[in-house]
Image (spheres, coloured by chain):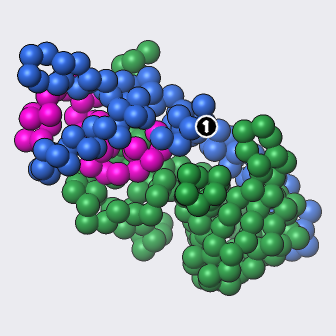
Amino acid sequence: MQAVADNLFRALADPTRRAIFEHLARDGEQTVHALTYRAGVSQPAVSKHLGVLKRARLVRSRHQGRETHYSAQQQALAPLVDWMNLYGAFWRERFDRLEDLLKRMEP
Amino acid sequence: MNTTSNPPETARSLVVERDFPHPPEKLWRALTEGPLLEQWMMNNDFKPVVGHKFQFHAEPNPRWNGVVDCEVLVVEPFRRLSYNWGVGGSESGMQWVVAWTLTPAEGGTHLRMEQSGFSPEQKGNYQGAKYGWQKFFGNLERVIGEVE
């Protein structure tokens, strides 16, 4: 589980990969050619990014004829949502404790 | 509002803010004096010195050894404090930056905590600014909403 989360965070740490993932999430299944056209980087670069996204289970590929079609797997974002909830709760609790401490401290 | 510390391309992922009826000087002590910091954060060997490497220690659990590896990045007394926040070692772990901003407010201090970035900022990367974390997290809610 931790390895899955690590892969996910690493995969999304790169802005180009986030952009590719967003395109797929927003516009649905696409080929490498279509993604390359929009990404403004070379096709090998896009393929490499797709490989990383695939390992993080953020995209799925499907072969049809000579083309490979990629689609976003939004449910793979779950660890990210968990992370946000976890840390959000963590910091709010710390703020509560800080508030208590400040009351106890001398002015 | 503090407009100097957050250029538009800065990735933002999590912000917690609160007003405290105490002066900035008092909050600064709670943020930077180790024994006080321990009372509301965690056991630590923090020093308010840029470049100082330190650790927070929390109760370990089966998924986490409880150690946060940090390095002080910014010390601007009574105004700004920031450090790296690394969990799980340098290679496979996750790296964030935690930035504290103190702003005098009526009758006290506005405290803002921002935890950002899963890796160092990648300025200059293709569409790095356009597809910053802030936008991504903004979209995330919508994307998740569509799934459910």
Amino acid on which disc 1 is placed: Gln
**Prevailing secondary structure class for the magenta stretch in the rendered image:** helix
A49 or A72, which is in the foreground?
A49
Q: Secondary structure at mark 1?
A: helix
Q: Please determine whether, in this image, residue B24 is positioned above or below residue B147.
A: below
* Residue B32 appears anywhere in the view: yes
The chain letter under disc 1 is A
Q: Between residues B31 and B20, which one lies in front from this camera angle?
A: B31
Give the image location of residue B144, x and y in percent. Answer: 42, 25
Q: Pointer 1: what residue?
A: A2
Seen at 80% across and 40% down, the residue is: B61
Magenta segment: does it hold A27?
Answer: yes
Q: Is residue B107 above or below residue B49?
A: above
Q: Is residue B140 above or below residue B77?
A: above
Whether the magenta-drawn stretch holds residue A25 is answered as yes
Asked whether, in this view, residue B15 is left or right of residue A91, the answer is left
Q: Position of residue A102 (x, y in %)?
A: 83, 63
- Relative image position of residue B3 (x, y in whole percent): 42, 69
| Chain A colour in the picture | blue
Range of the magenta residues? A8-37
Residue drawn at point x = 55 percent, y = 62 percent: B97
Quadrant occupied by the C terminus of chain B: top left
Q: Colour of chain B?
A: green
